[in-house]
Image (cartoon, grey):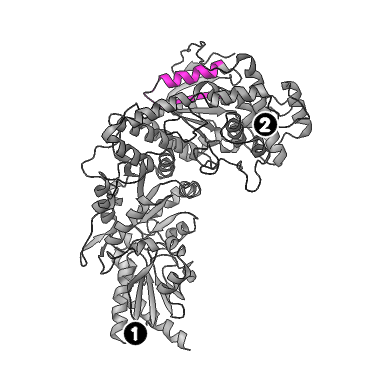
Amino acid sequence: MQQPQNVNGTPFEISDLSKSSFPKNLEARAINVIRGLAMDAPHQARSGHQGTAMAMAPLAHVLWSRILRYDAEDPTWPDRDRFVLSAGHASILLYAMLHLTGHGLSLQDLRNFRQWDSRTPGHPEADHTVGIEVTTGPLGQGLANAVGMAVAERWLRHRFGIEVCNHRVFVLCSDGDFSEGISHEAASLAGHQALGRLICIYDDNHITIDGTTELALSDDAKKRFEAYGWHVVDLGDNSEEIDVIEAGLHAAIANDQAPSLLILRSHIGFPSPNLTDNPEAHGYALFDEEIAATKTMMGLPIKEPFHVPTEVAEAYLACGRSGTSQRIAWQQRVDALGSTRQFYEACLRGKGLLGWHDELPQWDPQESLATRKASSACLNAMLDVVPGLITGGADLTGNTGTNLIDQEPLSPSYPAGRQIFFGVREHAMGAVLNGAALHGGVVPVGGTFLVFSDYMRPAVRLAALSGAHSIFVWSHDSVGVGEDGPTHQPIEQVMSLRAIPGLRVFRPADANEVVQAWHLAIDMQGPSAMVLTRQNVPVLVGTANGNGVSRGAYALSDVADPDVILVGTGSEVAVCVEAAERLGAIGVAAKVVSMPCWELFEAQDDSYQVEVLNPGVPSLSLEAGVTLGWSRWVDSAVGIDRFGASASGATVLDKLGINASNLVSKAQDLLTRSRE
C-alpha cells in the first residue's frame, strides 16, 4: 500500500475514523456487488461505460456508507451533502448507489438502463431521477456545477447560520474533466474564493477513449491545483484501500480553509482479468465471458445478473436512513428561526417576498435609456425583496448592468456578499450559475456580452435541460455595439439561443418591458436569458400597460383594419413604431407588435396568436440579427444576414438597413407583392 501524502509531501495518519454502522465483514462483498451492477446494466443495454464505475466502487462505498450526510427518505433535504458525478459517463455507479441506499430506484430501473423513458438515462439528469443533483455529461461541467454549489452553501451558511446550513459538496472528476478548459476556470475561481466545503476526488486512471492519457496529457494535477490555492492530498495507488480513501476524505473535511483535491490513482475495469487498465474498458467492453470471469474472481454468481444479496441490501438501506435524525433536528432549528424564517424560505424557493414586484421601477414615455441600465435598476431594486439574489459578471459587471450599488463583493472574508466577480471566465460562470441554482437557496445571475454567450452555450443548454433557475444577462445585443467591430457584434446568437428548448429568451423593447421580463424570470421555473442593449432606446407608449411580455407578444400600436403588421424585438420595436407613423402618413395602416419572448408567445393558445398576428394581413419583422426562423411568424423578414462592421453603432445599424426608411420601403414592397 502506497503511503498517501499531503501536498507538502508529509504523510497523514490513517486511523479507524469510520463511524459507519456498515458491517465490516460485508464491505468487500458490498463493493463487489456495486461492480457487478456496473457490469450488468451496460451489458443488458448493450451500451454504456463499465470500467470507471468498477474502479470507483470502493470510493462510492466509502462515500455512501461512511462520509455523506443524507437521508434517502427525504432526498431533497436542503442541508444534505451534495454529490456531483462530473464524470457522468459513469452514471451506473451513481444509479447503483441510489438503488442500494433506498432512493427509490429499483433493480428494474437498473435493468432499464439507457432505455426509452427509463429513470436511468445514459448520463445523470437532474429533475429526472431522484438523488441526481445536476445534469452532467459534457466533461468539466460537473466540476463547475460543484463550485456553484459550494458558493451557495457558504453564502447560506454565513447569511443564516450554521444551524440551518452546514454541509459539503463532493465531486468525482476524471482525466477528461480536467482536460476541458472549463475545469481550469472553475478550479481557479474556487481557489480564489477559498471554498473550503468543496471536495474533489480525481479518478486518475490514465485512460481516455483514444488510449492512455500520455498521448495528449502531461499535466501535473498536484502542482496545478496547488497553484490555484487548493489543499491537495495525493492518495497514491490506493483505490482499493477503503480506509485510505476515508482518511483522505477526512483530511479534506478537516481543512475547510480551501477547496480540497484528492488524487486517487485507479485502474479502470478492475478487477477484470483481461481489461483492467485497458482503454476499451472506458466504454462497453465487458461481455458475457469477461463478466463471468470477473464475477468468478469476486465470488458473485455468474448466472444471476443484478445480484444484490439481502444482507448487503439491508446494510446499505440502513446507511440511507442514517441521516433521518439529523434532518429532523435541522427542521426543528429551521422552525425556530423566528423573523428570518420568511427570508430563508424565500431563498429556498428561489422567489421574492410577498408583493416583491411592487418594488420594481417604472419609466415614463419619452425617457430614454439602455435596457442594460434598466436591468441594473431592477436588480438593485430587488435586493431587499428577493433575498436569494446574487449577481455578477464575467469581467463586464458594470458594462452588462449586473453591478450592485454599495454592495461588498463575495469573497473569503465576506462570504455573504451579493455581488460576485467571476473574472474573465464565461465558460465556468454559466456552469457555476447552474450549480448554485440547483443547489437551491440562491437566485444566481451572471452577465457578459451577448456575443460571448457562445462560450457559455454548453452550460446554457444544460440549464434548460435540467430546469435550473439560472438567469443569464447578455448585453450589447446587436451591431449597435459599434466600433469594436464584427468580432463583438452578435448576429446569429439570439436565434441560436431561441433554438434551445426550455430557455426563455427575453429581448425587451424598452425599460418597462425589462421590468416585466425580470418579474417573469424570478417567478417562473427554469432558466431565462435577458438580451439587452448597449445603446439608449426610448421608453415607448404602451409598454408599461398590461402583461404583454408575459404572453410573449402583444399589439403595442393597433389599428382597426391594418394593411400591414410590423413585428419587432428589442431596440427595433422603436424603429417599427417610427415606420408605422411614416406609413400612416401615406395612407398605409400599420399595426406594431412587440415580441419580446418567442417561447412565451408560442405557449399561447391559437386564438391569442391569431388576435396578435392577424393571419391574412401581410406581416414583416425587424430584428438586428439573422432572419433565419422568422418565417415561422411573418411573411417577410428584415435583418442582418452578414457579419457587422467597425463604425459607430448608429452608422452600422443604418448602413445595414435597421432603420425606419428601409422598413417602410420593405413594407411597401411586401404590400405590392401581396396584391399581385
Indicate the amino acid at tag 1. Val
Residues rendered magenta in the picture: 243-264
Residue occupying image coordinates x 34% and y 42% = 346
Q: Is residue 255 magenta?
A: yes
Residue 176 % position (x, y): 55, 36
Sooner in the amino-acid sequence: mark 1 or mark 2: 2
Quarter of the image where one finds residue 504: bottom left
Q: Which residue is mark 1?
A: 588
Q: In the rendered image of this protein, does residue 291 appear above or below residue 252? A: below
Quarter of the image where one finds residue 210: top right
Tell me if I can see residue 278 in this picture.
no
Q: Give SS at disc 1.
A: loop
Residue occupying image coordinates x 74% and y 27% = 274
Quarter of the image where one finds residue 26: top right
Q: Indicate the quadrant containing the N terminus: top left, top right, bottom left or bottom right.
A: top right
Please tell me whether mark 1 or mark 2 is closer to you in this view. 2
- Tell me: 386 left or right of 97: left
Residue occupying image coordinates x 76% and y 23% = 296
Residue 201 % position (x, y): 51, 27
Q: Give SS at disc 2.
A: helix
In front of the other: 263 or 654: 263
Local packing at callout 1 (Cα closer than 10 Å; few below 14, some 14-19, many 20+) is some
Indicate the amino acid at tag 2. Leu
Tell me if I can see residue 558 in this picture.
yes
Q: Is residue 368 magenta?
A: no
Residue 336 % position (x, y): 32, 29
Q: Which residue is mark 2?
A: 37
Q: Residues at badges 1 and 2 in contact (C-beta under 8 Å)?
A: no
In front of the other: 486 or 406: 406
